[in-house]
Structure formats: structure tokens, C-alpha cells
Amino acid sequence: MATDADIFTGQVDLPRMRRQRCSRLQTEMGRRDIPALLVFGSGAVQYAAGPSVISADSGRAAHLRTAALVLAGDDQPHLFTPYPEGAPPELVPDHVHPPLYTESDQGVADLADILSALSPGGLDRLAVDDLSGPMYRLAPRVLERTELVDASRLLGPARLIKTSDELECIRHAQRINEVAMHEVQAAMVPGIRQTELTGMFLRRAFELGATGNGIDPIWQVMAPTRKGGPYTTHGDVAFPLVTTDRVLDEGEVIWVDTGVHYHGYASDFGRTWIVGHEPRATARQRDQYRRWRDVVAATLAEVRPGSTGSDLTAAARAVVGGRTPWLPHFYLIHGLGTESAEAPMIGTDMGPEHDAALVLQPGMVLVLEPVIWDDGYAGYRSEDIVAVTEDGWVGLSDYPYDPYDG
């Protein structure tokens, strides 16, 4: 078991990381001839400006919302925030502004004035990641000479390849998550409530240095059959479900999913556990884990620069008789960064053409998340994180698979 001292074994240069991210955005803006980028999504704002933000539930998010504006040729972003004390220390004062309130008509008019003041020559194009109702309705009038374009087309490529500092942040976040989960797994015994596990996990994670929480911790009790589980519109296994105060019982199969942040970068922890003082997996459950492990091993054997998403999905299917070892509404692989699930996405409903077009490059982060499901016996699911290197991959997660691998 890891100790607290094992967590911080590397160094992160936060100012350098923020400079490099801004440079990537400037490059992508130049390629697409976009003079300005305005983002509101928490992951996008974190990438563009790197503020420290206050964690808040969704009901308060609009009141505590931050935004970031990147202007072509400016090596620093503009940050709009209700708490300027969270701005990066190297951000010059005239680039830190009060928050934008784009949920109101007046707020949109104020935004137009701000853009005009910061870009006296005018903006012919503005990349935006989110439009409030008033923005959508009023933009043709208050920004009549500005074409609004989809910010994802430049954000995606910029965020796809991680720098060494970004990789170290992800590794730190994952290490914190895993150390905290050792305590939680030991407490998963009959009679404990899901909410108790959540409190235990979050307390320990923040003691260990987490700077935010990205996923409402999930301790999902898996019904043996699809029909025995919650109703879903797609008719398949329901996952993920939110935590409740449900009391856990002996022998229940639990799909676990948590994610904390370290300086804006997410971890992603996924395992299958069994409730019990001395939990033991059945022969059928161990076989499910073995098949999951075989899928992961076959997939990782194809992970190297130049491989395509199709190479990975073909390898995953080959070891399970050509079947698809991931939920139809889910994926084989997703990326990880300032979002807990971001590009690259592999094995999704976007189809085989999407997978074929994706070519692995050094610095990509992959979260392998296959699912082995035997209707009538529940299933097995875990998540492992790797980063693509110059000649293969390196693991960023390291947590045991007990009680399935005994």
C-alpha cells in the first residue's frame, strides 16, 4: 500500500504549463484564422487560463461561473471571475476582470462592450464553447459583425497532446485518488451506506492534496441482469448512477468510479468490488476479470505512435470472439485531462470511420474502460490509465484488482 510520501515524487512547473497551453491555443487559432476564443466550460476555462476555482454544486454554478478570453497575438488570456484571488499569479492585473453574466440580456450587452474595448478593430470571428439563451438570441444584434463558430474545433486539437507538466498533474491526481481508495475499499462492508463511503473518500483525498472533485463518487450496486437494473432508454446496463444513502449488503457487486483534480487535471478511478469483511470472487466472477484483463492486454499491445483507433478496437474484439467488450452506449477508451472524459474517444457510437481516422501520438492519455457483462451474473469493469510514449505506453495508474485477481 502506498503512503503519503509516495505521492509527490515529481515536479510540476505550473507557470510553464499555462504558457505552453496558451501557446497551443494560439497555434490552433492561427491555423483556423480565428482572432478570439471565449470559453465558459470549466475544463476549457481551466485549460485556457488556469484559475483556482471554488467547488460548487450545479445549482450554484451559474453564480460562480468563470470565463476565459484568448485574443490572437496576446500571450496571456483574459480571465473573468467572481474570485480574482484565484487567478494565476503571473496573470497581469489588467487581464483579470469581474465575471460575465451572460444569462441576462444586460450581461450579453456588457459582453459585447467588453469585446469591443479589448478588440478595438473589431472581431470578424469568435470561437465560443457555450451559448446561453440570451447570447443565442441577442448575438445577431449586439455582435452583428462577428461570426460565432464552434470552439471545439480548436480546443480539441490543442488539448489532445499533453505536456510533461500535464502528465505529471494527471499522475498526481490519480495517485491521490488511489491512496484514498485503499481506505474506502477496506470500509466497504455490510451495513455501510454509499454516502458514508463518499464522505470518507473526499475527506481523505483533500487531506492528500486534491484541489477539486470532478465526479460525484459512484458506488453502483449492479443487478445480475439488465432487466433487474434501473430502466434505461437504450435497454442496456445502467451506468453510472448517483450515490444515495443505500445500505450495502454482503456479496453485492459494486462498480466504483471516482475522480479528483490536481491543479485542474482529473484522475479517473474505476474498479469492481464485492461487499464483505473478507470478500471473495466466485469462479464466474474471476473469469469475468480474466476476460477483462485479456482485452486490456491485447489493446495495450497495439498502443504506440501510428496505431489507429481501429487497431485498438480490433484487438479488443479479437480476444473475446469478435464481440464488443464495451457497453454500446459507452466506449472502449476515452481521454483524460482537464475533463474526466475528453478526446480521444475510441469505440463509440461515432462509428468505425471515427476510430480509423484517429492516429495515436506521444502525449495522448488513454483510459481503458472495457466491460465484461454476463447477463444473469452481472459483470466486471475497471479503468486503467496510460500515456502514449515515443515507442509504446507508460502506466499512470497502479491499483490492485482484488478480490478478483486472487
Image (spheres, rainbow, N blue to C red):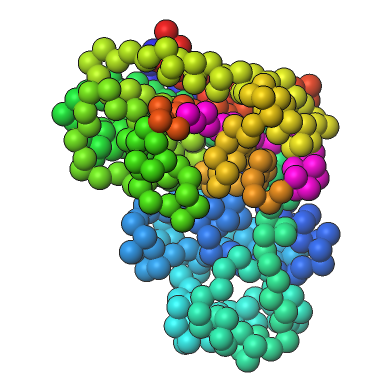
User: Quick one: which residue is furthest to the bottom in this view?
Assistant: 141
Q: Position of residue 242 (x, y in %)?
A: 34, 47
User: Is 146 contained in the magenta span?
Assistant: no
Q: Is residue 31 above or below residue 348?
A: below
Depth check: 284 or 395 in front? Answer: 284
In the image: residue 330, left or right of residue 354: left
**The N terminus appears in which quarter of the rendering?**
top left
Residue occupying image coordinates x 28% and y 38%: 198
Q: Position of residue 294 (x, y in %)?
A: 61, 18
Q: Where are the magenta residues, as a range?
A: 352-374
Depth check: 157 or 3 in front? Answer: 157
Q: Position of residue 159 (x, y in %)?
A: 67, 47
Q: Position of residue 79 (x, y in %)?
A: 54, 63
- Tell me, yes or no, if residue 338 can be seen here: no
Query: Where is residue 224, by image quadrant?
Result: top left
Depth check: 387 or 284 in front? Answer: 284
- How many dots with numbers? 0
In the image: residue 70, left or right of residue 291: right
**The C terminus appears in which quarter of the rendering?**
top left
Residue occupying image coordinates x 35% and y 36%: 223
- Tell me, yes or no, if residue 346 can be seen here: yes
Depth check: 257 or 221 in front? Answer: 221
Residue occupying image coordinates x 33% and y 64%: 59
